């Protein structure tokens, strides 16, 4: 586990959903990929087939695509979110550093594709973005005690946006809870590829950048994480089985819309790009229903 380096999941012109080995460069446009056989990313085998990814794969949903690139996972049993995990974000929020990770959950229905529209309920106002590194668990685990050994359960890494309605997150509305504000359908785009631990290299060397309508809003090196990937797995697996396919959003750095002066809430038609070095970019348009 795993037998891939950079896994891409896509739909071909016949409507078949395939897994392929993406090229090592950041762009997937126009590349021919080796096709895998299998339905889950932790149980794949290479075939002799190859497929060319259309140059329009990065287009938003208003365009027709020859090959539609999907989220690396067809399904997740649960999405864990981690709050206050970047020192810069803790500083901009003005909150004390927590002794343990701050945890909330998002349901499986929040999972969304790397280039899909984020459809927003009209009552979800004060919309925000949170660029994040996502960790995908590839093997069931429970009561993991050592952060270094915890990495053996990681299937790979991908880029994510923890989409948030700050209205539903406001203390006077939510009672200090974060989950509901982040749990609506499609509020967790991930992708564009799932990169194995070996291919990704050290997480601390990765750089995350978030752009809104091409304007840079967030930039951070992942060595700014308060709790590393292994620490998060140890904490989340305490008394709890982390099933294969579980997604862990590792937190967001400073630069979210809520703490800009004035807050720069997202409007319908705005696009949010989250790019992580060594992984690639997701690009999603926010559209109110």
Image (tube, rainbow, N blue to C red):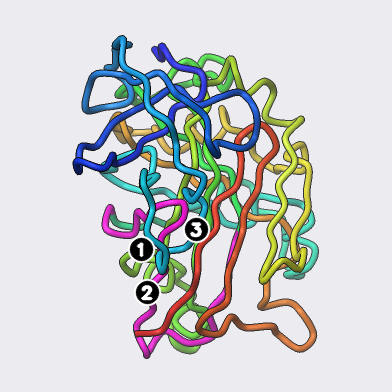
Residue topped by disc 1: 186
Residue sitting nearer the eye, 130 or 6: 6
Looking at the rendered image, the disc whose residue lies closer to the viewer, 1 or 3, is 3
Q: Secondary structure at mark 2?
A: strand
Mark 1 and mark 3 residues within 8 Å of each other at the beta carbon: no
Q: Earlier in the sequence, mark 1 or mark 3?
A: 3
Q: CA distance from mark 1 to mark 2?
A: 7 Å
Quadrant (top left, top right, bottom left, bottom right) of the N terminus: top left
Left or right: residue 127 compared with residue 142: right
Label 1 packing within 10 angstroms: few (<14), some (14-19), many (20+): many
* Residue 16 rendering spot, x and y as whole percentages: 20, 37
Rounded to the nearest angstrom, the CA distance separating label 2 from label 3 is 17 Å
- Report whether 34 appears left or right of 77: right
Please give the label number shown on residue 119. 2
Point out the frontmost of discs 2 and 3: 3
Marked residue nearer the N-terminal end (1 or 2): 2
Q: Which residues are the magenta region?
A: 108-130
Say if 275 sits above or below 204 in the image. below
**Labels 1 & 2 near each other (Cβ < 8 A):** yes
Say whether disc 2 or disc 3 marks the residue closer to the N-terminus.
Answer: 3
Write the residue at 37% across / 27% down.
Answer: 51
Name the spot of residue 176 as percent of width and height, x first.
49, 75
Q: Quadrant of residue 104?
A: bottom left
Mark 2: few, some, or many residues within 10 Å (few <14, many ≥20)? some
């Amino acid at each position: 586990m795993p037998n891939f380096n950079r896994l891409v999941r896509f739909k071909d012109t016949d409507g078949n959903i395939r897994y392929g080995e993406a090229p090592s460069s950041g762009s997937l446009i126009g590349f021919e990929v080796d096709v895998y056989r299998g339905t889950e990313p932790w149980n794949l085998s290479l075939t002799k087939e190859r497929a060319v990814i259309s140059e329009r794969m990065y287009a938003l949903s208003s365009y027709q695509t020859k090959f539609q690139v999907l989220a690396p996972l067809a399904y997740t049993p649960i999405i864990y979110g981690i709050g206050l995990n970047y020192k810069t974000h803790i500083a901009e929020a003005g909150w004390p550093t927590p002794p343990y990770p701050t945890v909330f959950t998002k349901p499986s229905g929040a999972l969304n594709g790397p280039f899909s529209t984020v459809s927003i309920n009209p009552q979800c106002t004060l919309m925000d973005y949170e660029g994040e590194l996502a960790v995908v668990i590839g093997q069931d685990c429970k009561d993991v005690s050592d952060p270094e050994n915890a990495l053996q359960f990681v299937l790979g890494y991908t880029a994510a946006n923890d989409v948030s309605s700050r209205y539903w997150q406001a203390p006077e509305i939510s009672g200090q809870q974060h989950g509901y504000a982040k749990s609506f359908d499609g509020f967790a785009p991930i992708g564009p590829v799932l990169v194995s631990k070996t291919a990704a290299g050290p997480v601390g060397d990765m750089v995350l950048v978030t752009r809104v309508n091409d304007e840079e809003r967030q930039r951070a090196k992942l060595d700014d994480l308060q709790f590393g990937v292994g620490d998060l797995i140890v904490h989340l697996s305490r008394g709890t089985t982390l099933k294969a396919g579980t997604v862990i959003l590792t937190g967001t750095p400073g630069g979210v819309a809520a703490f800009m002066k004035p807050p720069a809430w997202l409007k319908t038609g705005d696009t949010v790009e989250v790019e992580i070095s060594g992984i690639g970019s997701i690009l999603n348009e926010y559209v109110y229903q």
